[in-house]
Image (cartoon, rainbow, N blue to C red):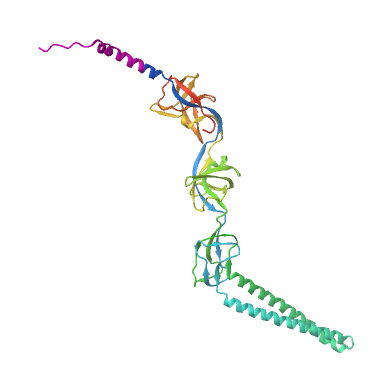
Amino acid sequence: MIPKTPIPWSSRCLAVLLPVLLAVFAVQAKDAAVPVVVSQAESRTLTPMQQVAGTLISRNDTRLAAQVEGQVVWVAEVGTHLVTGEAATRLDDTLIREELAENNASVLRAQASVEFSRAELNRLEKLAEKSHAAESRLDQVRRDLAVARSELSAARARSSRSREKLQRASITVPLDGVITERYIQTGEWADAGTAVVRLVDTTALEVQAWVPVAILPYVSSGMLLDFVANGSTGSGRVRTLVPVGDQQSRLYEIRLAVDADGWSSGQGVRLSVPAAVSRTATVVPRDALVMRREGITVFRLAGDSTVEQVSVTTGIADGDYIEVSDGILPGDRVVIRGNERLRDGQAVDAAEKLPGT
């Protein structure tokens, strides 16, 4: 039989005191004040918003067409930037130039005929003062002069039309823009009215969107609305409200004038439009919300050293703030940092959130 070794007295004391010490430390840890940051709940006027799809488009998107007929000899390439007055397409103007030369010659002949008839009239008028024999010839010369003047006017009109046709053989752009499409190629024949190129002004953009009829009463001309495109935010004022809806989609068109800087025609956007009348509501920073199994809660500072857990219902978002109801009032101080592991009634060491932090 192996004799038992006596347990030292110090070990016995440690075995007795250790559970007590652990319990004390646990209570102290439980009651230790948790450092948190708090912010105030506020009262704000909020507007329920709805997201609708839209597109950035050019206010000046046009198809240029031939104004005279002819064979195409040159078309600007897609992507070409043109300024007002520059040519986008040229037609063969050989026949037009020949026509202009012929009409100019007709003008010269008509001018000579007028000058001859005028000189003859002057001569006969002087003779008529001395002899009545010239009287019969005067009437004929006056008629000849009238006919010559009429022919001169007609010749000048034909010449003017030919010059205009010659100018129109070069299809110029009416505003600064970019060629985005070519509808005709070099060597093809263009009749008057044939579309040749598409010109887009990239400096004048607007957002085009379609909204349900229920939203129309809350959108007005001049209203500033926000949108998001490719992760970037922008804003624009309502420029157009079309009161007639699309027969198939039952949606109504709205357009916003926007600054073109940083945007491109064709970009898709998400536009925020008001969906109901504005209302006054209590809001808290989004960081005040804590997701628990029992729902969404907010920890409100009770006095200066403890917190109480309040179940809330969220509503409209307003930037970094969100509407809450059921238990939170404007002016209440709510925990926005350090609230992840808080519990109801826990002691805290609260610090106020500084502006801009």
Q: Residue 67: in sight, yes or no?
A: no
Residue 20, image quadrant: top left
Magenta span has 6?
Answer: yes
> In the shown orientation, is residue 142 left or right of residue 73?
right
Q: Could you tell me which residue is drawn at 51 percent across and 24 percent down?
A: 333
Q: Could you tell me which residue is drawn at 74 percent across and 78 percent down?
A: 149
Q: Residue furthest left?
A: 1
> In the shown orientation, is residue 342 left or right of residue 62?
left
Image height of 29 relative to 295, above or below: above
Image spot of residue 254 (x, y percent)? 55, 47
Q: Residue 152: in sight, yes or no?
A: yes
Image spot of residue 289 (x, y percent)? 45, 29
Residue 97, image quadrant: bottom right
Image height of 278 relative to 183, above or below: above
Image spot of residue 39 (x, y percent)? 51, 27
Q: Which residues are magenta?
A: 1-25
* Dominant secondary structure of the residues highlighted in magenta in the image: helix
> In the shown orientation, is residue 21 left or right of residue 320?
left
Q: Could you tell me which residue is drawn at 69 percent across and 77 percent down?
A: 155
